[in-house]
Amino acid sequence: MNNELKNPTPASNYHFDLPKHLIAQHPTQNREDARLLVVDRERNLIHHSHFRDIVDWLKRDDCLVLNETKVLLAKFIGYRTKTKGRWQGLFIEHDPSSGVIKVMCKTRGRIQPGETVTLQDREGLDSAVITMVAKLDGGCWAIKPPGDMSIEEFLQQVGRVPLPHYIRDGNMSDADIEDYQTVYAREPGSIAAPTAGLHFSDRLLNQVIDGGINIAKVTLHVGSGTFRPIATDSIEAHQMHGEFGCIDQATINQIEATRQAGGRIISVGTTSTRLLETAGKQTPLAPWSGTTDLYIRPGHAFQLVDGLITNFHLPRTTLLVLVRTLGGDDLIKEAYRQAVEQEYRFFSYGDGMLVL
């Protein structure tokens, strides 16, 4: 019997109490003005700073690894055309060969194949009618958009920013279209933002480069499972979700050059971390593309990542497990205690943490 089964880690170990008023409902007016809690593992110290000063905590020849994924307008609001019952959906994936879209959806009553749903645009006006094609596993449906509309046109016309429920009950404002997107987003495909990167402005990124710190790019599309809480009794029993990502040769070259120069690989976000550590399992290191379900938990030996920029995560989630695995259990628990005590802003639009 392996050690995991002998000594399972209770998921309750990753619970913490958070006053509701600390859950950020909007970002800071200027992205880089968010606060920054710095975890110094070497000295076992915690410092309090601001994100605009992050260059002061980095060194020449370090390398920041950014996730270039772009958040889709993936949330749908509408009603069942026949019954007028409210309907809500979340884009999951698109099959270009058939034109069918997979959505996770909920509504009152039992919807039937062939039934239509009227979608409303961001102004609340009827905008498009979709057909429910077939019921799939996990509360999902295959749907068919109207006519020969491309997926890009369809999402632009009827999609909304897929804010998590803890931000204004998921109700977007016009500002969220820009706010819930990193300034360096390039590759459409996510249904949640890689939130650690939301604090960077173009000005701050230029300051990073001017400081002799390198920038590398990866892509990992954030899926619906990213915020899913650990519902099992132990963290080991949790089934990790998969997400598609890729690392190209240019980034591999940058990582190797950073290593040779004595710099550190600082991943921006848990998404970048999972992707880097997935690629890092290869010998020799090489470009990688595919779906990763890597679950970083106690016992994981980090191959590429030396440090992490992240936000403050929900209790009892794999994101929190990852951060505590990298940063050290006691030190990160103390960091979260201080963050609550000093009223840092939590979750997607909240403040940042730098683990070094």
Image (cartoon, rainbow, N blue to C red):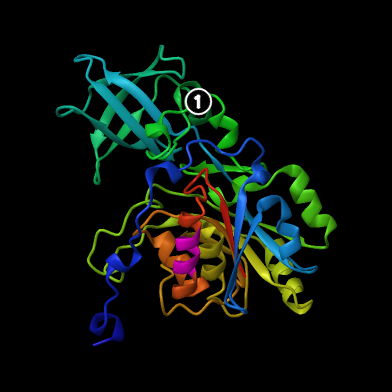
Q: Is residue 16 above or below residue 124?
A: below
Q: Is residue 279 left or right of residue 210?
A: left
In the rendered view of the protein, which quadrant contains the N terminus? bottom left
Q: What is the x, y in percent for residue 176?
A: 54, 31
Taking the magenta stretch, the answer to whether it contains residue 62 is: no
- Residue sitting at x 38%, y 28%: 76
Q: What is the x, y in percent for residue 136?
A: 25, 42
Asked where in the image residue 218 lies, by quadrant, the reply is: bottom right
Label 1 is placed on what type of residue? Answer: Ser
Q: What is the x, y in percent for residue 162?
A: 44, 35
According to the image, label 1 marks what residue? Answer: 173
Taking the magenta stretch, the answer to whether it contains residue 336 is: yes
Q: Which residues are magenta?
A: 332-338
| Mark 1, secondary structure of its residue | loop
Asked where in the image residue 81 lies, by quadrant, the reply is: top left
Q: Is residue 299 above or below residue 228?
A: below
Q: Is residue 105 above or below residue 330?
A: above
Q: Main secondary structure of the magenta part?
A: helix
Q: What is the x, y in percent for residue 40?
A: 61, 72
Q: Is residue 212 visible?
A: yes
Q: Is residue 346 left or right of residue 64?
A: left
Q: Nearer the viewer, residue 133 or 314?
A: 314
